[in-house]
């Protein structure tokens, strides 16, 4: 466990301040853009990029990229004409349009590529992109099958050492989560052994045309599509990977032709006695965290000295330390 010596009130205020800023930004989802999308005011040194997949997620990314001045969208690709037109409207300008992603990868003007297609297409496309010499940002998950894990490890980075491959696990780019990680490293939460995460929706994914997330041949279900964000946070905060997982899932409510489960509960066991409990549901959006100020999804990261759930994290840490030292808890300022 990291040493706790040297932790001062100033450390606490700095960490809480960073978390506060990030949580405020998180109220506007579009404010949380991946690090490489942030503007650095270098319009004369732009990177030409293309995007494969201009459905809902691709359009969202293009909307963010529109305000970034160190990159220029020169090509977009989608098999659907409606999505192509929406992609063009999202980014503006006059990028080239392609129906076949391999034609986009053959375009010498494209230096890097974003992949925002359904997850079962991720690995074949990122492998082709690396082989074409492009840098790659791929939405999670990078792979869909166990075999693809081994294939990716075999080719990257050994065969493509000069190319950047980045995965779209969004919490890694949040200043809030980065601040919590710093708190753990400083020992401010004590011995962090337990984490709880959930993503509850009501009604969750519904049956509609082309909803690939509802079928096992194209989707990893609730755990892969939603839980992966929280699993990644646990790996990050625990600084390790799970040794085993046990779980229970079933299809109990949504009998509409899907073959993925509509609810799942998992327990991950990590080294050093650390555990993550995760819940995913399609029949409730209740979240018993954050004082009821938000619904659906979030995490609780608990240690022997304090627990992080929101802006209350530092107040809770400070209160625990003061009570243990025998001093009175400070009064809260009224706002």
Image (spheres, helix red, strand yellow):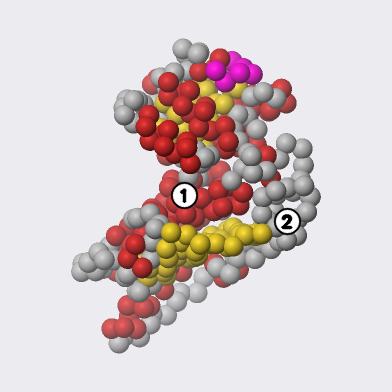
Residue drawn 55% across the image and 62% down it: 247
Q: Residues within 10 Å of mark 2 (few under 14, many from 20)?
A: some
Q: What stretch is highlighted in magenta?
A: 96-102
Give the secondary structure at mark 1.
Answer: helix
Q: Mark 1 — residue? A: 171
In this view, the residue in front, 120 or 315, is 120
Q: Which mark is residue 203?
A: 2
CB atoms at circles 1 and 2 under 8 Å apart? no
Give the secondary structure at mark 2.
Answer: loop
Pinpoint residue 330: horizontal percent, then vertical percent.
38, 80
Query: Can residue 141 be seen here?
Result: yes
> Does residue 14 show up magenta in the picture?
no
Pinpoint residue 4: horizontal percent, then vertical percent.
24, 69
Pinpoint residue 137: horizontal percent, then vertical percent.
46, 32
Pinpoint residue 132: horizontal percent, then vertical percent.
44, 18
Q: Which badge, 1 or 2, comes first in the chain's sequence?
A: 1
Residue drawn 38% across the image and 66% down it: 274
In this view, the residue in front, 237 or 149, is 149
Residue drawn 61% across the image and 52% down it: 222
């Amino acid at each position: 466990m990291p040493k706790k010596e040297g932790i001062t009130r100033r450390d606490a205020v700095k960490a809480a301040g960073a978390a506060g800023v990030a949580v405020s930004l998180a109220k506007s989802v579009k404010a949380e853009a991946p690090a490489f999308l942030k503007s650095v005011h270098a319009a004369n040194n732009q990177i030409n990029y293309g995007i494969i997949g201009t459905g809902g997620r691709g359009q969202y990314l293009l909307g963010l990229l529109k305000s970034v001045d160190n990159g220029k969208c020169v090509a977009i690709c989608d098999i659907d004409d409606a999505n192509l037109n929406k992609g063009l409207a999202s980014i503006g300008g006059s990028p080239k349009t392609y129906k076949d992603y391999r034609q986009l990868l053959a375009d010498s003007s494209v230096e890097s590529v974003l992949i925002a297609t359904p997850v079962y297409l991720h690995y074949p496309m990122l492998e082709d992109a690396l082989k074409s010499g492009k840098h790659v940002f791929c939405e999670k998950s990078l792979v869909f099958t166990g075999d693809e894990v081994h294939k990716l490890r075999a080719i990257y980075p050994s065969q493509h050492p000069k190319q950047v491959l980045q995965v779209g696990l969004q919490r890694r780019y949040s200043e809030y989560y980065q601040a919590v990680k710093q708190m753990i490293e400083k020992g401010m939460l004590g011995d962090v052994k337990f984490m709880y995460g959930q993503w509850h929706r009501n009604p969750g994914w519904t049956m509609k045309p082309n909803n690939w997330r509802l079928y096992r041949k194209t989707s990893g279900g609730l755990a892969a599509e939603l839980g992966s964000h929280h699993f990644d946070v646990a790996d990050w905060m625990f600084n390790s990977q799970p040794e085993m997982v046990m779980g229970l899932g079933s299809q109990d409510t949504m009998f509409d032709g899907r073959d993925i489960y509509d609810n799942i509960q998992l327990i991950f066991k990590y080294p050093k006695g650390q555990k993550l409990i995760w819940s995913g549901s399609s029949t409730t959006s209740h979240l018993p965290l954050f004082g009821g100020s938000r619904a659906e999804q979030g995490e609780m990261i608990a240690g022997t000295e304090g627990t992080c759930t929101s802006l209350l994290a530092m107040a809770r840490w400070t209160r625990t330390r003061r009570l243990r030292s025998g001093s009175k808890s400070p009064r809260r300022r009224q706002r």
